[in-house]
Amino acid sequence: MRGLVTELSRRLDAHQRSRIAELDLTPTQAKALEELGEPKTARELAGVLCCEPPNVTYVISKLEKQGMVVRRPHPQDRRAKQLVLTEAGRELRLDLLRRMGTRSPLDHLSHEERVALRDELLRALGRVEGG
């Protein structure tokens, strides 16, 4: 059973990565775009992405060169900059969200089967967390 769960996880991850690659993004760039629906500082984004600020700086620099993100003065803190999506960045973010929300490998499941699968996975997670 554990092998099946591992294989499903691996395949879902590969599916997600291929959807992201269609947009010529890395997984980290995609996650940054998702999170920048609202302006954030690099430090805030690093916290959400669970990575160090220098890594976020690298990711944002790439998105900035592609014209997806701009840095603007923070309205309350003159020392800080906010990361803001450009119009092109907002369009790419919407495309990304549409792609990630459609054509899942689990699409063939009925609503009832999805609910049952979710409930069983939550129960299994509870057992793992509870010992």
Image (spheres, rainbow, N blue to C red):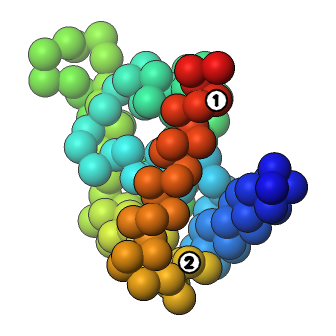
Q: Which mark is residue 106?
A: 2
How far is disc 1 from disc 2 in space, using C-alphas?
Answer: 24 Å
Q: Position of residue 60 (x, y in %)?
A: 52, 41
Relative height, residue 125 to residue 28 (above, below): above
Name which of mark 1 and mark 2 comes first in the sequence.
2
22 vs 65: above or below: below
- The residue at 31%/63% (across/down) is 90
> In what element is the residue under mark 2?
loop
Query: Would you say residue 108 is visible in this rendering?
Result: yes
Q: Amino acid at mark 2?
A: Leu
Up/down of 3 relative to 78, above or below? below
Tag 1: amino acid = Val
Identify the residue shown where x is 20% and y is 12%.
77
Q: Quadrant of residue 78?
A: top left
50 displayed left or right of 93? right
Give coordinates of residue 31: x percent, y percent: 50, 49
Residue identified by numbered label 1: 128
Q: Nearer the viewer, residue 1 or 82?
A: 1
The residue at the far left in this view is 76
Residue drawn 44% across the image and 71% down it: 114
- Percent across and percent down for residue 47 are 46, 22
